[in-house]
């Protein structure tokens, strides 16, 4: 038999090599005991003999499939073009390209999530599974991006200086995909720091296609907008049968009045004054949760992003997260916070990298104040889901969370309501299951 023939890898009937299922024939067992003191026979690795049959039948090759001719030919060192090749410029280019490829994947997944959520009837259970799956993938990618900065830090500032001048005006500030990512998640132009607000779209003024994409990303519903719409429909939020908001408000009123009674009994005047101040702060905080006008003024000041109802919906989901209906919604809210905090971590790692490479007072190649500008982007202004982070202020200890009514308990006990979309989806699934008529 040809030694590289297809039979070589499958020795089912070959007594010399034993059974592929792990059993060894008697004859072979005895030969093993006899030869236990002998030097081990030469190891024959039959797996290595296998042949890539598919390559012989034609079809697309690895390199063609991945368009490696383009990807691996895209590292053009400016230092080399200028006659003085700087070794680390290669790493600099590869790192940025890897970022842009991952940005592309993130945008691809985020667009899909937006598609799943853009539904006037709500988000079905099946779509919720896909949404959470893609959000978790995005989290994994951003985690990788946070750490990728560390690889670039193996380049010393002096190495960077060797080729920095060749970058001329090129800067990460011009990364369209990064801006699309920010906008599609829900960062609003008015929340950007001033320098960026003025300039962030100006860099594309001579690039009409890019400018159009950027403008579209500002107009289209972002993940934040879609999530808010979905949260506003949280079951039990303000229903006749069970109004979470009303019941929650009653608990808070009782809490605050009990607290006030305690403060009034406080004999120490200095302590009493201190307790009164913190009590008033609590009263104001809760008022902003119940009074839509106060909430809206918080939004106008940039302290909150979510609509009044969406915030209450998120609070309800977090409070009753153990009810089956809220398992996935709760996971979704946690995933959004993870994304926000990981992007902040990326910003932080990038700022540290910039300070290491340029110090605190060198201007960036994009024309900003460099480190100082980037440091200002680390604030809460850039947190799209800041309301979810701040929601902890309003959580209640388990024992005083308003009890659900039996009907509400039943509604939240099933995984999701069965609406028009679920019905359509079910019909589609059933149609796929139907036997094919010959
Ligand atoms: C030696 C490495 C790096 C240095 C010295 C550096 C420097 C800077 C500076 C100074 C800015 C401010 C804008 C300006 O140029 O004036 C900036 C912005 C930016 N850089 Fe980098 N950068 C480096 C690596 C990276 C990498 C690897 C990425 C990955 C894509 C990146 C992405 C960005 C982005 C997206 C911005 C805009 C941030 C914002 O406006 O919020 N940078 N960079």
Image (cartoon, helix red, strand yellow):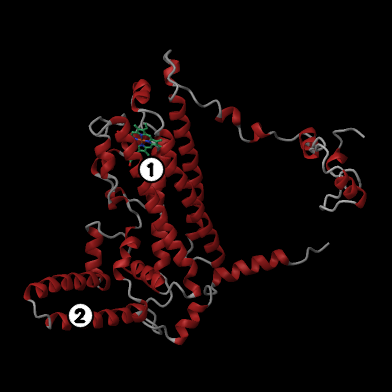
| Numbered badge on residue 259 | 2
Which residue sits at x=21%, y=71%?
Answer: 282
Indicate the position of residue 281 as horizontal and vertical percent values: 18, 69
Q: Are marks 1 and 2 in contact (CB under 8 Å)?
A: no
Q: Nearer the viewer, residue 271 or 425?
A: 271
Dot 2 crowding, Cα within 10 Å, few <14, some 14–19, many 20+ = some
Confirm or reject: label 2 Cβ below 8 Å from ligand 1: no
Crowding at mark 1 (Cα within 10 Å: few <14, some 14-19, many 20+):
some
**Residue 179 marker:** 1
**Above or below, 141 relative to 285:** above
Front position in the image: 211 or 240: 240
**The residue tagged with tag 2: helix, strand or loop?**
helix
- Displayed quadrant of residue 420: bottom right
Decide: is 168 above or below 249: above
Which image quarter has ligand 1? top left
Whether label 1 lies within 8 Å of ligand 1 gets the answer yes
Q: Is residue 415 left or right of residue 169?
A: right
Q: Position of residue 163 (x, y in %)?
A: 37, 21
Residue 196 placed where, x, y %? 28, 41
Residue at the limit of the structure toward the left, as seen here:
269
Q: Secondary structure at mark 1?
A: helix
Taking the spot 81% from the left edge, 35% from the top edge, the residue there is 42
Q: Quadrant of the C terminus?
A: bottom right
Rounded to the nearest angstrom, the CA distance separating label 1 from label 2 is 47 Å
Label placed on residue 68: none
Instruction: Please name whichever residue, 109 or 399, is drawn nearer the observer in this view of the structure.
Output: 399
Question: Which residue is farthest front?
Answer: 37
In which quadrant is the N terminus drawn?
top right
């Amino acid at each position: 038999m040809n030694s590289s023939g297809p039979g070589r890898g499958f020795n089912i009937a070959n007594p010399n090599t034993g059974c592929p299922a792990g059993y060894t024939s008697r004859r072979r067992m005895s030969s093993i005991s006899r030869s236990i003191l002998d030097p081990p026979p030469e190891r024959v690795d039959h797996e290595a003999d296998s042949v890539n049959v598919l390559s012989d039948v034609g079809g697309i090759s690895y390199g063609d499939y991945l368009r490696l001719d383009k990807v691996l030919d895209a590292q053009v060192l400016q230092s080399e073009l200028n006659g003085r090749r700087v070794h680390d410029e290669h790493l600099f280019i590869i790192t940025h390209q890897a970022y842009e490829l991952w940005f592309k994947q993130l945008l691809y997944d985020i667009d899909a999530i937006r598609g799943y959520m853009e539904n006037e009837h709500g988000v079905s259970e099946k779509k919720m599974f896909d949404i959470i799956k893609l959000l978790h993938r995005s989290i994994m990618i951003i985690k990788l991006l946070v750490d990728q900065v560390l690889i670039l830090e193996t380049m010393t500032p002096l190495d960077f200086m060797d080729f920095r001048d060749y970058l001329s005006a090129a800067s990460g500030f011009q990364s369209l995909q990064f801006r699309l990512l920010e906008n599609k998640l829900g960062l609003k132009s008015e929340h950007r720091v001033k320098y960026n607000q003025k300039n962030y779209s100006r860099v594309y003024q001579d690039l009409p296609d890019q400018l159009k994409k950027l403008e579209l990303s500002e107009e289209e519903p972002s993940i934040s907008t879609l999530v808010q719409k979905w949260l506003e429909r949280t079951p039990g939020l303000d229903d006749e049968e069970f109004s979470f908001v009303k019941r929650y408000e009653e608990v808070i009123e009782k809490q605050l009045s009990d607290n006030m009674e305690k403060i009034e009994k406080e004999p120490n005047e200095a302590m009493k004054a201190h307790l009164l101040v913190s009590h008033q702060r609590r009263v104001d905080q809760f008022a902003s949760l119940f009074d839509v006008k106060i909430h809206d003024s918080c939004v106008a000041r940039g302290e909150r992003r979510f609509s009044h109802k969406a915030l209450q919906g998120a609070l309800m989901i977090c409070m009753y997260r153990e009810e089956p209906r809220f398992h996935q919604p709760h996971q979704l809210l946690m995933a959004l916070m993870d994304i926000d905090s990981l992007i902040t971590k990326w910003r932080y790692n990038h700022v540290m990298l910039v300070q290491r490479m340029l110090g605190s007072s060198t201007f960036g190649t994009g024309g900003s104040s460099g480190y100082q500008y980037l440091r200002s982007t680390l604030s809460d202004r850039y947190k799209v889901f800041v309301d979810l982070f701040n929601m902890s202020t309003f959580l209640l200890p388990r024992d005083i969370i308003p009890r659900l009514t039996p009907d509400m308990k039943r509604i939240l006990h099933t995984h999701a309501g069965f609406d028009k979309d679920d019905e359509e989806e079910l019909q589609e699934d059933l149609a796929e299951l139907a036997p094919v008529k010959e």
